[in-house]
């Protein structure tokens, strides 16, 4: 067993050293082109559209074919390593580890989903600030696109990124309403989508956008207050259990112990 471990370690170290030498001597390989080509061959048009939507919602700027190539490449690399170790050690049971190669496919997907969730959470947490800045900007500047740009810059983070994209698309001739609806589709959050829909409808039908933003901010604050009250009620319910465990039970023990001691001595 020790000899097998030493043999495997020696071969892996030798392979690493040889790999460095080969990499220096061989012509430079365009890894991105290879991975993109792999993704093109393994990705259908429907899956490509869905993956592109996820990448956009994650705030990344990579091609879906390249991302797919990364997943396939990592899966193939892990599988090759497992097979190599199985052949090297002549251990058939090593092949049972081949399903672990799926980790190379699942980990990038998990990272992508994590970025999407983090981005949506940031949109939700900064919504109050964005509405406040937008309402303030609309009072000083009647032009909606200027107020949006100022509010996005003041809020920062994901709002600044998305609003800058909306402003850029509008400057290139795209309708502001369509750009805002696309932003709502990319954000994929109900509260943010309702705000952007309200802004786009106000720009179409007219009216004071500033007043509507103030009303929306008031409703948002009221909803937040009810959420806080609901959370406080849940905390009170949980505290009942804490009181029972750490206060009522010791009190009952303190009261009942003398009676138990007296009964024990008398009988």
Image (cartoon, helix red, strand yellow):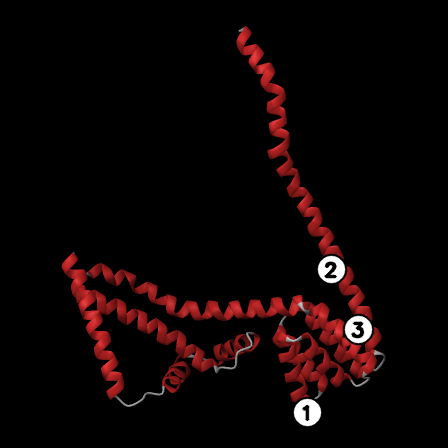
Q: Which mark is residue 32?
A: none
Figure quadrant of residue 71: bottom left
In the current view of this chain or complex, which residue is farthest to the top?
Answer: 266
| Side of 40 relative to 244 (left or right) | left
Q: Is residue 179 above or below residue 98?
A: below
| Side of 224 relative to 35 (left or right) | right
Q: Nearer the viewer, residue 37 or 84?
A: 84
The mark tally for this picture is 3
- Dot 3 alpha-carbon crowd within 10 angstroms: few under 14, some 14 to 19, many 20 or more: many
Figure quadrant of residue 26: bottom left
Q: Cα distance, mark 3 to mark 2?
A: 16 Å
Residue 55 on image: x %, y %: 52, 77
Q: Residue sitting at 60 percent across and 16 percent down? A: 258
Secondary structure under tag 2 reads: helix
Q: Cα distance, mark 2 to mark 1?
A: 35 Å
Figure quadrant of residue 127: bottom right
| Side of 262 relative to 218 (left or right) | left
Q: Is residue 252 above or below residue 14?
A: above
Could you tell me if residue 163 is visible in this image?
yes
Q: Which residue is mark 3?
A: 213
Q: Residue sitting at 28 percent across and 90 percent down? A: 27
Q: Which mark is residue 224?
A: 2
Q: Nearer the viewer, residue 219 or 13?
A: 13
Q: Which residue is mark 1?
A: 171
Instruction: Name the N-terminal-most of marks 3 and 2.
Output: 3
Secondary structure under tag 3 reads: helix
């Amino acid at each position: 067993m020790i000899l097998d471990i030493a043999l495997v370690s020696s071969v892996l170290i030798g392979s690493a050293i040889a790999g460095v030498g080969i990499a220096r001597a061989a012509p430079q390989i365009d890894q991105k082109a290879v991975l993109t080509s792999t993704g093109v061959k393994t990705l259908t048009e429907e899956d490509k559209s869905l993956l592109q939507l996820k990448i956009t919602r994650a705030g990344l700027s990579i091609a879906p074919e390249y991302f797919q190539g990364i997943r396939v490449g990592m899966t193939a690399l892990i599988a090759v390593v497992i097979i190599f170790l199985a052949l090297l050690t002549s251990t058939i049971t090593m092949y049972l580890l081949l399903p672990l190669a799926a980790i190379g496919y699942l980990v990038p997907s998990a990272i992508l989903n994590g970025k999407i969730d983090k981005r949506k959470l940031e949109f939700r947490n900064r919504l109050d600030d964005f509405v406040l800045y937008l309402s303030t900007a609309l009072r000083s500047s009647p032009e909606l696109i200027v107020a949006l740009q100022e509010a996005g810059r003041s809020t920062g983070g994901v709002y600044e990124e998305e609003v800058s994209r909306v402003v850029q698309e509008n400057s290139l001739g795209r309708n502001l309403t369509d750009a805002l609806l696309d932003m709502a589709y990319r954000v994929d959050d109900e509260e943010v989508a309702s705000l952007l829909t309200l802004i786009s409808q106000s720009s179409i039908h007219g009216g004071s956008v500033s007043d509507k933003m103030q009303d929306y901010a008031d409703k948002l604050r009221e909803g937040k207050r009810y959420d806080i009250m609901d959370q406080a009620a849940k905390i009170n319910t949980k505290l009942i259990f804490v009181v029972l465990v750490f206060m009522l039970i010791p009190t009952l023990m303190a009261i009942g112990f003398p009676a138990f001691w007296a009964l024990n001595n008398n009988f």
